[in-house]
Amino acid sequence: MLWPFNHVRKPRLSPRATIEPIYGMIVAQTRDPLFYRHLDVPDTVDGRFDLLILHLWLVLRRLRTAADGTALSQVLFDHFCDDMDANLREMGVGDLAVPRRMRAFGEAFYGRTAAYDLAWQDGEAQLADALQKNILNGKQPDSALRLASYASRAAASLAAVDDTTLLRAAWAFPAPLEQDSMR
């Protein structure tokens, strides 16, 4: 006998096996000290959050073109939200304040990713402007250009990864700085 709702069933992904390593790589990349020492990203909760959004946006952008990417994107975004909720609670934010803070995180995420998507279409200089505004607090235009260059290299690196490798989380972000600029 056929169950009438079989067509509504969610696709069979292994979210925990796929999402945790991908999200772990995103978080690990945002913790690289080079972003804070050499690219002038503020080493604050807000600066780290903004850098996390940048990396999450880069991965979500790539997942748009992957097979099963839409479903995986949603699972990745949900994992991000769960992580933000858990971090708020760990920091001692009360149960009544968590929904308000989560709404603010959502607004920040959607606002920044929309700005990055628009800027991406217009080139690296526009992306640098968006990054300067959203991550560098309107300061450090040279650092914004280097951060935009990094984002372009990261996007190119992710684009070069085939779907199977991407979904197995068997890839890595490039170094925050090119070797020549580390001297």
Image (tube, helix red, strand yellow):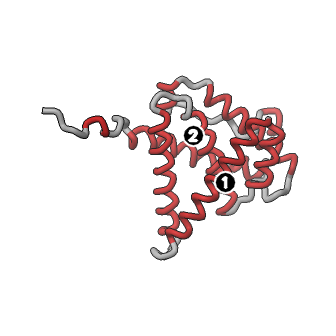
Report the amino acid beneath label 2. Answer: Leu
Q: Residue at x 52, y 74 (%)?
A: 97
Q: Residue at x 34, y 39 (%)?
A: 10
| Mark 1–mark 2 distance (CA, rounded to whole Å) | 15 Å
Which of the marked residues, 1 or 2, is nearer the chain's N terminus?
Answer: 2
Q: Is residue 105 left or right of residue 150?
A: left
Residue at image mark 1: 111
Report the amino acid beneath label 1. Answer: Gly
What percent of the width, then of the height, locates residue 89?
48, 69
For residue 60, the mark is: 2
What percent of the width, then of the height, locates residue 114?
67, 47
What percent of the width, then of the height, locates residue 136?
78, 55
For residue 138, the mark is: none
Residue 121 in sight here: yes
Q: Residue at x 50, y 41 (%)?
A: 73
Q: Is residue 145 left or right of residue 72?
A: right
In-front residue for pair 17/7: 7
What percent of the width, then of the height, locates residue 62?
59, 33
Q: Residue at x 52, y 59 (%)?
A: 84
Q: Is residue 183 left or right of residue 165?
A: right
Say what secondary structure mark 1 lies in. Answer: helix
Give the position of the C terminus as an image quadrant: top right
In-front residue for pair 127/21: 127
